[in-house]
Image (tube, rainbow, N blue to C red):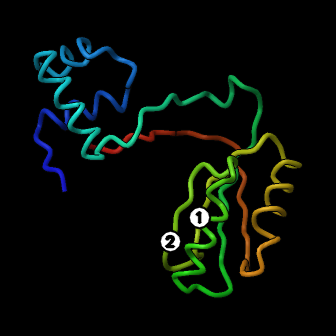
């Protein structure tokens, strides 16, 4: 496991707010030299602390959409069947997040689709068609009050 010092943590916190900063801007914000900052960011990437850098697109800017939080319970929960379910969901672009959970359903999904018709198509294709799915329970977002994908560093 990578040991993070206070400078690494400052770099990570700033990058999680805006990964489009130049190295010079980042260095100024975390109070280190530009070469030190660049070296540390490269190390954090190489060691897998920074998985990837992405742009978070506003759903509202692209048009109306539907967010569903979906609980899925499988009939049988062997390690192989749990992994198989995950592998079948991974190609689904509608699935934004997939969590294997305990004490309740086997999985919780965050699904984003254009509308209810698209959700029904997704649910039939990705969930109902799987023989090992016992129960699906869906909740539809009517308002998002917080979205903060940053992990406290």
In the depicted structure, whether residue 73 falls above or below residue 61: below
Instruction: Look at 56% across and 59% down and name the residue there.
Output: 98
Label 2 crowd bin: few (<14), some (14–19), many (20+), radius 10 Å: few
Displayed quadrant of residue 41: top left
The C terminus is located in which quarter? top left
| Front residue (pair 38, 110) | 38
Instruction: Look at 23% across and 12% down and name the residue there.
Output: 24
Report which residue position mark 1 lands on.
108
Instruction: Look at 45% across and 39% down and name the residue there.
Output: 148
Instruction: Look at 65% across and 77% down and name the residue there.
Output: 73
Does residue 23 appear left or right of residue 57 in this picture?
left
Report which residue position mark 2 lands on.
101
Dot 1: what SS?
strand
Dot 2: what SS?
loop
The extreme front residue here reads: 46
Mark 2 and mark 1 in contact (Cβ < 8 Å)?
Answer: yes
The span from disc 1 to disc 2 (Cα, nearest Å) is 7 Å
Q: Which numbered disc covers residue 3?
A: none
- The percent coordinates of residue 75 (x first, y second) are 68, 86
The N terminus is located in which quarter? bottom left
In the depicted structure, whether residue 78 falls above or below residue 39: below
The extreme right residue here reads: 117
């Amino acid at each position: 496991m990578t040991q993070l010092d206070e400078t690494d943590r400052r770099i990570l916190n700033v990058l999680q707010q805006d990964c489009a900063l130049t190295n010079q801007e980042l260095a100024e914000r975390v109070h280190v030299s530009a070469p030190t900052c660049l070296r540390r960011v490269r190390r954090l990437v190489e060691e897998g602390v920074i998985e990837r850098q992405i742009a978070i697109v506003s759903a509202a800017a692209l048009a109306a959409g539907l967010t569903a939080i979906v609980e899925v319970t499988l009939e049988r929960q062997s390690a192989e069947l749990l992994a198989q379910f995950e592998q079948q969901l991974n190609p689904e672009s509608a699935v934004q997040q997939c969590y294997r959970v305990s004490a309740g359903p086997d999985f919780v999904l965050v699904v984003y689709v254009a509308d209810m018709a698209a959700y029904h198509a997704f649910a039939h294709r990705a969930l109902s068609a799987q023989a090992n799915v016992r129960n699906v329970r869906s909740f539809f977002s009517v308002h998002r009050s917080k979205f903060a994908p940053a992990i406290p560093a």
